[in-house]
Image (tube, rainbow, N blue to C red):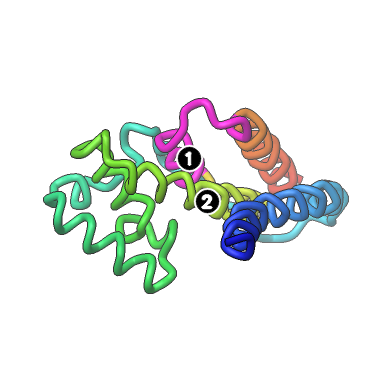
Amino acid sequence: MLDLTQGRMARRIAPVILLVGLAACSKQEDKAATTAPATGSTPAAPAAAPTPATAVSPQVQSMGADQLRASATKALQDNRMYAPAGDNALEYYLALREKQPQDATVNSALTDLLPYTLIAAEQSISREEFPEAQRLIALIEKVDPKAPALPRLKSCLETGMKTAANRSEQ
């Protein structure tokens, strides 16, 4: 019984450790990005930033509960946790939570997927993939509007976009 408890604890701690490691590394990458020489490429500016209300695609929202659950399971098996947009486990579970808000399995799945989505958002910001970062941040906000990382992510995104815009003007 002790081995099962330690295994569960390890599965819960592993994403946190990965997140802390990524956060420690991202500070160095931000400094490198601000001191890097200007390149000829300019990051694409999004037409409109996704909001939590528009984070889940309309096609996913129109699916039935059974189809959402099956699609979410299939997406997890295919390792499509948060991407591609409109065909990932996080969006399926968010739509399913709207249909079945008291389902503990759905809420647990969303909680489990949140650290991976957070890491992906940080990586998108560091790679200057701002539209993808905005989409992921909107998904995180829809999962948990009070997520402690949201203000930091939004600030990093804004700073990254300003830095990229300044670099492209030079």
Closer to us: 62 or 112:
112
In the rendered image, residue 53, in percent from the top left (x then y), is placed at 32, 32
Amino acid at dot 1: Ile
> Label 2, label 1: how many angstroms apart (C-alpha)?
7 Å
Which tag, 2 or 1, sits closer to the chain's start?
2
Closer to us: 78 or 2:
2
Q: Residues within 10 Å of mark 1 (few under 14, many from 20)?
A: many
Magenta residue check for 140: yes
Which quadrant is home to the N terminus?
A: bottom right
In the rendered image, residue 38, in percent from the top left (x then y), is placed at 78, 55
Residue at 48%, 40% in the rendered image: 140
Quarter of the view holding residue 169: top right
Q: Which mark is residue 140?
A: 1
In the rendered image, residue 73, in percent from the top left (x then y), is placed at 30, 64
Magenta region, mostly helix, strand or loop? helix
In the rendered image, residue 107, in percent from the top left (x then y), is placed at 37, 42
Q: Secondary structure at mark 2?
A: helix
Residue assigned mark 2: 117
Marks 2/1 in contact by CB < 8 Å: the verdict is: yes
Residue 39 visible = yes
Closer to us: 107 or 113:
107
Q: Residues within 10 Å of mark 2 (few under 14, many from 20)?
A: many
| 41 sits left or right of 62 in the view | right
What segment is highlighted magenta in the picture? 134-150
Amino acid at dot 2: Thr
Quarter of the view holding residue 162: top right
Closer to us: 103 or 3:
3
Residue at 67%, 33% in the rendered image: 152
Q: Secondary structure at mark 1?
A: helix
